[in-house]
Amino acid sequence: MGWLLAALAFAGCNGGRNGMVEVTGQIEAVNVAVGSRLGGRVSEVLVEEGARVKQGDILVKLETDEAEAAIAAARARLAQAEATLAKLENGARPEEIRQAEAAAARAEAQYQMAQKGSRRQEVRAASAAVDAARAARDEAQTEFERVKKLREGSAASEQLYDRAAHALETAEAQLRTATERLDIAVEGARSEEIAMAKAAYEQAAAACELIKNGARKEDIDAARALRDAAVADVQRATIAAKEMVIVSPRDAVVESLDIHPGDIVKPGAVASLVDPEDLEVYIYVSAFTLGKLRIGEKVVLTADAHGDERFEGTIAQIASQGEFTPRNLQTKEERAQQVFGVKVKLDSAGGKLRAGMTVTAHLPAHAAE
């Protein structure tokens, strides 16, 4: 800070020369930090430090496997949501209505059958099935007893004995099943079975009616909202995938880039770019000089490295409050120590001006109109 005050003091001593106020400052280049909002694993680094790049050039690529999978999943959800919405908006197809009507008719017939009980011929058939199952069981029992005696006398193999025992178990199970069916046919369905048949019929009838009448408005609105959310998911996944490719936002020079393929980078900047044509210099002027400056006003600059050669800059910003201010400003001399920052924009003048050079701004001493 001391060097600035010294420079201002020097400028004040020479302020009357050629009617100009001279203030020095150092040129700075505008740095742009580029990176990814998401981060990830580096797959490719396409530029090196010092390289000149143009707007849109790819600098770094991150692995995209997860991003591509997220896009695919989001698109699948969107397709499903669109299909559901279209189905609700268009209503059921004729074949779907016929299928629903047939299902309702079957459920009604089963319910009526449960209420009425089995027909006479069904009872006879069930009784015949029991007789056949009993005869098969008796035959299996006789065969098992015969093989058992042979086995006790070591005249039959263990495999033959096991086969006969298994056949007997199967025949007994079939007899039990046939007997249960006969009991149901004779006694009729139980009350809980009738209730279940009734519930199934009512459900099938309601489903058929719903398909015929079409979806309610609130159902369509809900499906449309799900479709819109799925669209947003696809957009979000696509934007995330774009974050896997880091590009230059402007024509610039790569100032710093210290990453390599395989590195894991966090969300944030991975490279710093500098535009050699976008330069600026901060100068500090007294409160008295400040009143003579306006944003957009041209400023003549000279550089130590180029002697008396003159360059042009433009005042881009004037600070709204002073800096390096003493605690109390009671006299005119004390107020002269208060300074205000002024930003001057300039270009490289064909490469003659560079960041780090010291320049002198020659400010007009007359009051601005």
Image (spheres, rainbow, N blue to C red):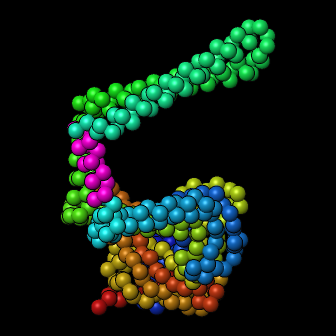
Taking the image as shown, residue 155 lies to the left or right of residue 113, namely right
On screen, residue 359 above or below 220: below
- Across and down, in percent, residue 43 comes to 68, 63
- Residue 162 location, quadrant: top right
Q: Where, quadrant-wise, is the C terminus in this rendering? A: bottom left
Main secondary structure type of the part rendered in magenta: helix
**Residue at image x 39%, y 77%?**
317
* Span highlighted in magenta in the image: 101-115
Please say whether residue 358 is visible from this viewpoint.
no
Which residue occupies the foreground of this view, 121 or 290?
121
Q: Quadrant of residue 197?
A: top left
Taking depth in this image into account, of 85 and 296 the one nearest to the observer is 85
Left or right placement of residue 244 versus residue 85 in this view: right
Extreme residue in the top direction = 152
Residue 79 percent coordinates (x, y): 43, 66
In the rendering, at what x and y percent does residue 44 appear?
Answer: 69, 66
Please tell me whether residue 240 belongs to the stretch shown in magenta.
no
Residue 271: percent from left, percent from top: 61, 66
155 lies left or right of 302: right
